[in-house]
Image: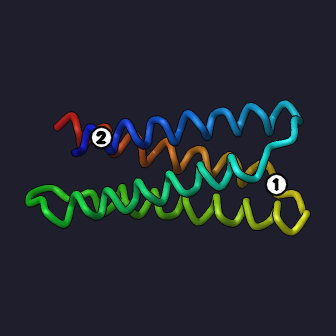
Amino acid sequence: MLSFIIIWYGLTGLLGIILLVLKLSGKQVKHLTGIIHGSAGLAGIALLIFFISFGNGDSLLLTILIFLLTFLIGGGMFSTVLFGKKYPSWILLIHVLTGLTGLLLLFGFWLK
């Protein structure tokens, strides 16, 4: 199941990279793409919670908290866009870095 979760987050990250490239190139990003990206991230958090609830041994709690922080930052960015305002680029950078940190922690746990 952990392999599936890593693939899930890889696909979510790939969609995030597409969103990032569109945003940096100045093209209009559809709201549905952001909704799908955020929903996939939230589903990944749910899968991780499901995974650790039946496992014993090392915990993925830090990874879940980092992904939750990433989700909340992304939700803030999305709500800012819905209100017709722009968010600073540094918030986007923090979102990307926290997402990558969570993915690296998850991958490191998988390699153990």
* Residue 4 place in picture, x, y as percent: 30, 40
Q: Quadrant of the N terminus?
A: top left
CA distance for labels 2 and 1: 33 Å
* Residue 97 place in picture, x, y as percent: 57, 45
Looking at the picture, the colour scheme in use is rainbow
Q: Is residue 98 left or right of residue 34?
A: left
Sequence-wise first label, 2 or 1: 2
The residue where tag 1 is placed is 88
Q: Secondary structure at mark 2?
A: helix
Residue at 22%, 57% (x, y): give it: 51
Q: Secondary structure at mark 1?
A: loop
**Quadrant position of residue 29:** top right
**Quadrant position of residue 38:** bottom right
Residue at 67%, 33% (x, y): give it: 18
Residue at 71%, 54% (x, y): give it: 91
Disc 1 packing (10 Å; few <14; some 14–19; many ≥20): few
Q: Quadrant of the C terminus?
A: top left
Q: Is residue 20 left or right of residue 38?
A: right
Q: Is residue 111 left or right of residue 98?
A: left
Q: Amino acid at mark 2?
A: Phe
Out of 64 and 83, give the one closest to the viewer.
83
* Residue 61 place in picture, x, y as percent: 30, 63
Residue at 35%, 45% (x, y): give it: 105
Out of 73 and 18, give the one closest to the viewer.
18
* Residue 111 place in picture, x, y as percent: 21, 34
Whether 30 is drawn above or below 21: the answer is: below
Report the number of numbered marks: 2
Q: Is residue 58 left or right of residue 8?
A: left
* Nearer to us: label 2 or label 1: 2
**Quadrant position of residue 15:** top right
The residue where tag 2 is placed is 4
Q: Amino acid at mark 1?
A: Pro
